[in-house]
Structures are given as C-alpha cells and as structure tokens.
Image: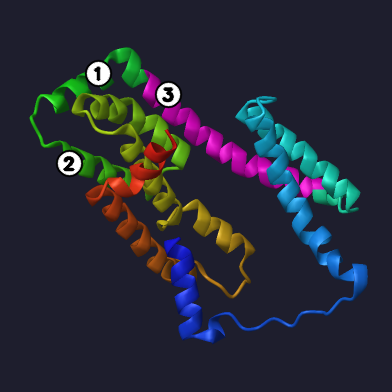
Amino acid sequence: MAFVVYIIVRVKLNPSLAPRAAFTEYHGWEKFRPFFQYVVPLVSIFVVVVASMSAGWATPTESAAIGALFTVLLAAVYRALTMANLLRALRGTAAISGMILFIILGAMTFSQILSFSGASNGVVETIATLGLPPMGLIAAMMLVLIFLGLFVEQVSMMLITLPIFMPLVQKLGVDPIWFGVMFLICMQLGLLLPPHGLLLMTMKGVAPREVTMGHIFRAVLPYIAMSIAVLALVFLVPAVAVWLPKALV
C-alpha cells in the first residue's frame, strides 16, 4: 500500500513520469480482444496454481509444476509455443534454478550441520541466558536479516536463520505472527537491496539497454526507505500486524 500511495503521489506531482499512452479504440467484440489476449492468460495461470493448492489437489511444489504445464499449454493455444521459444525458456530456467539450488544446497548443509552438532541449541541457550531485553533481540534479528539480504537469496535466509530465531522467539514469549510479519518484510526488503537483490536483476533483464544498474539502484532507494519505515512501524506498533489475524480468529 505504501508503494502504491508513493507512485500515485509522484505521478500527480510530476505527470511526465507516467505519460498518457496512445490506445487503439476498438468497437464491438473487438474491444475485448486485449483483455483475452493479455489479461486472461496471466490471471488463469495464477488461478490454476492457487486453486490447486487451496483445494488440496496438489502440494505447493506440485502446483508449481501444474502452473508450468498450464503455461506451456497456453503458449500452444496462443500459437507462441515454438522450439526456439521453448529452448530459450528452458535455458533461462536452468541457469536461474541451478544458481538458486546451489545456494539452497549450501544453506541446507549449513543448517543441518548446526542442528546435528547441537550448535544451534547452544547458540539459542547462550543468547537466552544473556538477559537481553526481548525488543533488543528482535531488533538485532531484523538487522541480521537486512544484512543477509544484501548477499543471500530469501530461501537461504530462512534456512540459515529460522533454526536459531524461532526457538529464541518462543523462549522470549514473542507473538510469532508479529515476528513473522517483520521477517517477511525483511525478506521483501532483501529483494530490493543492492547489489544482489533479485528484483533488481529482474528489472535489469527487462529494461532497455540504456538503463544501467546504477539507474535501477537509484530508483529503488525510495522503496527501500518505505520498507524500512513500514518495518519500524510494525516493530513499534505490533497491533498493525496482528489486528487482522486476531479479528479473523
């Protein structure tokens, strides 16, 4: 919501940031063509993936496979499924997935070593006996997550930190929903942080050639500031994060 408000205010103050596009005017059934051509495919993939999980037909991993298969079928229906496009998609998927899986492998190995050696329990007990204030420990955890977000992918962050953080949260008697919301904000912040934020790499991949990483780094600074402000708000006013779950119980 903060991002949306910021974008609206910036565009109102400087309309040149979002110039009016030239739309082709359609008549009759032809005016629905852009909707079925551009909106329906994307929304239908989302619906299939979420519905398969919500209905209990498939696990999240299986739902991802269903989404990939449905995407291929849609590409075939829209006559965009060619061997060149398929090979290009497979090469890109293999490159990105291979990189992420190696990072996850290292993080899982590190997590298992900590668990089997008892190091994670030792760290938790040591920190718990220091007598530090709970809010100070939670703030330190958030700083650790923000620091890791500079270099580490989000799944790896969870594998590395949760075996230590969650037992501490339980020992401190901290609301796990409140902590979980702040944890997710920190992971979302990691997607935006230079130099290795995944969203920054994604933006660079789709931006014109004249747009450099320096341009992207500067453009993302307001969103980083807003994310930190929201994190501080949730930290100082826990009710912001927990009122809705409590209202639904």
Q: Is residue 91 magenta?
A: yes
Q: Is residue 244 left or right of residue 208?
A: left
Distance Cα–Cα, label 3 vs label 1 = 17 Å
- The residue under label 3 is which amino acid type? Thr
- Alpha-carbon neighbours of circle 3 within 10 Å: few (<14), some, or many (≥20)? some
Image quadrant holding the C terminus, namely top left
- Magenta residues (range): 86-112
Q: Secondary structure at mark 3?
A: helix
Which residue is the site of mark 1?
121
151 with respect to 35 (left or right): left
Q: Which mark is residue 109?
A: 3
- Can the viewer see residue 148 in this picture? no
Q: Is residue 132 above or below residue 125?
A: below
Q: Assign the magenta stretch its main secondary structure.
A: helix
Say if the magenta span includes residue 200: no
| Residue at the disc numbered 2 | 135
- Residue 206 in sight from this viewpoint: yes
